[in-house]
Image (spheres, rainbow, N blue to C red):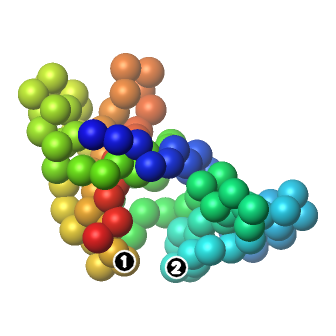
Amino acid sequence: MSVRRVVPDIRSEAMEESRGFYEHLGLETVMDLGWVMTLASPSNPTAQITLTSRDESAPVVPDMSVEVDDVDAVHAVMLERGAEIVHPLRDEEWGVRRFFVRDPNGRVVNVLTHR
């Protein structure tokens, strides 16, 4: 298993204002589904943040996202270790396969692979 990127997920009730703020820091919008948007550095595309007003298919908004090369393998390890799965492993219509797991600090981690 390898990690491709780690992205903080920021819950926002002010999506457009937040976009403007982070654009002033030099980030550009690379994905916008209305309820979730990702902004990235044009010179370092793995330097990203995600803004989320809600989650379209999950009961909670995650605190961070970890993109891995094999989400099914990570899911199997988390189940084996008895981790709390907050949102089941599933394919999402926007092109990712993901699940949410709670870390030992109570934070919700969105673990995903792009399809």
Q: Decide: few, some or many residues near mark 1? Use Cα within 10 Å; few <14, some 14-19, many ≥20.
A: few
In the image, residue 68 sits, relative to residue 37, either above or below, namely above
Answer left or right for 31 relative to 4.
right
* Residue 73 position in % (x across, y down): 16, 43
Amino acid type at image mark 2: Leu
Answer left or right for 54 relative to 3.
right
- Locate residue 79: give its quadrant: top left
For the residues bearing labels 1 and 2, Cβ distance under 8 angstroms:
yes
- What's the residue at 37%, 27% (across, down)? 103
* Residue under label 1: 94
Q: Judge by depth and name the residue closer to the eye, 93 or 87.
A: 93
Q: Earlier in the sequence, mark 1 or mark 2?
A: 2
- What's the residue at 14%, 24% (across, down)? 82
* Residue 99 position in % (x across, y down): 27, 51
* Residue 65 position in % (x across, y down): 46, 48
Q: Which mark is residue 33?
A: 2
Q: Quadrant of the C terminus?
A: bottom left
How far apart marks 1 and 2 lie (CA) works out to: 9 Å
- Locate residue 59: give its quadrant: bottom left
Answer left or right for 9 relative to 106.
right
Q: Secondary structure at mark 2?
A: loop
- What's the residue at 52%, 79% (across, down)? 33
Tell me if I can see residue 59 in this picture: no
Q: Secondary structure at mark 1?
A: loop
Tell me if I can see residue 36 in this picture: yes
